[in-house]
Amino acid sequence: MKALNSDNDSSHFLIKQTVRKLYTTFLISSVTLNICFLIDGLCTSVFVGVNGVAAIGIIAPIGCISWLFINILGKGGVIVSGQKIGKGDTKSAKAIFNFILVLELVIALIYSTVIFIFSEPLAFVMGAEDILLPYATSYLKGLSLGFPFLILYGVLMHFCSFDGAEKNRLFAMAAITVTDIICNILFAKLLGLGMFGLGLATACSNLAGFLFLLPPYLKKDHIISIDLKSSNPAFLSDILKKGIPEGSFEICNFLCPVIINKILIYFGGILLVSILAVVNSAKGTLNSIIYAIGDTSVSMGSFFTGEEDTDSIVQLGKSTLYNALAYDICVSLLIIVFLNPISNALSGGSIEVSMLSHPAFLCVLISLFFTVFAETFARLYFSQGKSTLVSVYNILSYFILPIFFALICVSALPMNLKWIYIFLPQLTILVLIYIAVALKIKTFIPSFEQMITFASTFKLQNEDRLFLSVNNKESSIEASSRVIDFIKQHDLPSKTAYFGGLAVEEMTINILAYGYKKNNLKNIAVCAIYKENKIEIKIRDNGISFNPTSYAAQFTNEDPTKNIGIKMTARISKEMNYQNLFHLNMLTIKL
């Protein structure tokens, strides 16, 4: 069967617009969070000195354990929930969220207690020896008090994009930043609590972030809301299976810095550790570009995976990559221009550390460029449920290759060249991905689409899906006609074809008439899908939020002419569902 020509301009436009909104919001919130790390670094440098900065760098991997709990369950839950929502099963998505919330609370309380009690031996194991041990121990004790709030905040953060609640994430980030600044000055400077005060300030900022992110989840009409009675542990196995790659990522992020710190100490002493700590204080902000890729790709990608929509996944990948590269170039240029003041501010007054950190900063910027490409591919593989593939990627990219190159470069190269170990792993992994795709599809130069979808196993074929764009009455009528042809092409009854065309025309004209403010650009994406001898019609727009299914239920026969299009569509369809997802109206009509 020959596929009809699709017009997916509106679909692509909506994806680009949504990605831009989500990515920018996630990036700003992530940058704001990492500004807190910069603030901690600056406050530590000013109030304590370079030993305090080095101590924080050494025990930083402890925080990765918190994100291990957050991401295995949180990201795994987002993927399973997104795929459920993509299939129209919002009830299961809500049950998954509430189960994760309960489980994470129990884990958080246990973890925080253990860290507080055993802070000194843990700091020692991390590599804080001799003069650095008391600094690291005190900071870890204060920091541990905020781990429960950090873990709960992390869960809420992962799910916020489904209902368009990511704006609250910005408010939460602002609260975190302001609280961190105030508490750093109060505890460390005014009250003289030193490293413990700095850790306690971060704990208080975690509490503030959690409280500001909580309100949207208390609204019962949201797709994802707090209803602990709906919690269902039956999905745990699937959540863990999907979350394993994030677990491998966090474990690698925990172990790798510990080993690399020991390599640096062995070959260069505290000087190299201090240089890396200075770079890492700024690297967190740079990594926000990468984290925003994950947040955007995983939530939207899992939804499109549930729909088995290859075209949308490819467009998602392109839009995410373009946004990430744009921010990468801007941030890199700013870092290069202001490299001297940045390194001076973070070096604790040490001119030697400041000057020697410049090559390391440049290597981080090179690494970021390669990582943008590698992470875009990896996160989309992750959203498609390719757990084993992404786990291998994480282990190679964030553990084996960094340690391998660090051992060679730090031991054998002069000071200014030692830091090339920072970008060599990502360059290598990007080459490996390219080779793997080329071998799989037997093409020497794979296309971007092939790079993204080579691991896909969707059953829907191109001829089973028809994309159409509607932006005026004429295109609405044309879309209706093409849907009729599409349904007839699949040998379904003429009645079904007529109903499909009628539903498209009635609903799109209604959206054109009432869904947009005057003079706003109108983009309605229509997708007809043939699946299991049935027809589904999906209509998406970025207009005013409007649920036609609730209105259809309210209309009576007392006024048969009122909203006749919505009533007619509701009657001829076997099922009509509405969701407001990613700031888009999404209507699904099953015939």
Image: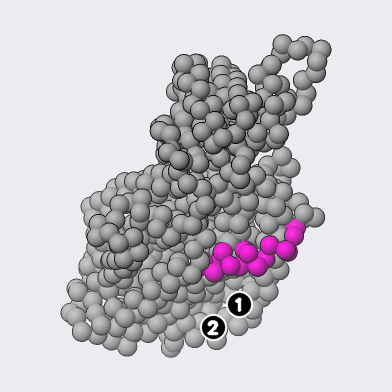
Q: Considering the numbered disc 1 on the image, is that residue within a helix, a strand or a loop?
A: helix
Rendered location of residue 208, percent (x, y): 61, 54
User: Is 201 part of what is drawn in magenta?
Assistant: no
Residue 381 is left or right of residue 339, and the answer is: right
Does 367 appear above or below 258? above
For the N terminus, which image quadrant?
A: top left
User: Which residue is label 1 attached to?
Assistant: 115
Q: In this view of the protein, which residue sits in the foreground, 167 or 309?
A: 309
Q: Which of the pair 529/510 is nearer the observer?
A: 529
Q: Is residue 241 magenta?
A: yes
Q: Residue at x 72, y 25 (%)?
A: 571
Residue 451: x, y in percent? 35, 56
The one nearer the camera, 64 or 542, is: 542
Q: Mark 2, residues whose alpha carbon is within 10 Å: few (<14), some, or many (≥20)? A: many
Region rendered in magenta: 231-246
User: Does the rendering let one see residue 201?
Assistant: no
The C terminus, quarter of image: top right
Q: Earlier in the sequence, mark 2 or mark 1?
A: 1
At 52% from the left edge and 52% from the top edge, which residue is drawn? Answer: 459
Image coords of residue 526 (percent x, y): 51, 31
Q: Which residue is mark 2?
A: 122
Mark 2 residue type: Leu
- Residue type highlighted by circle 1: Ile
Residue 530: in sight, yes or no?
yes
**Tag 2 and tag 1, C-beta contact below 8 Å:** yes
Give 190 or 323, whichever is nearer the viewer.
323
- Crowdedness near tag 1: few (<14), some (14–19) or many (≥20) residues, C-alpha within 10 Å: many
Quarter of the image where one finds residue 104: bottom right
Taking 577 as reference, is 425 above or below it? below
- Residue 558 has which mark? none
What residue do we see at 60% from left, 57% from top?
80
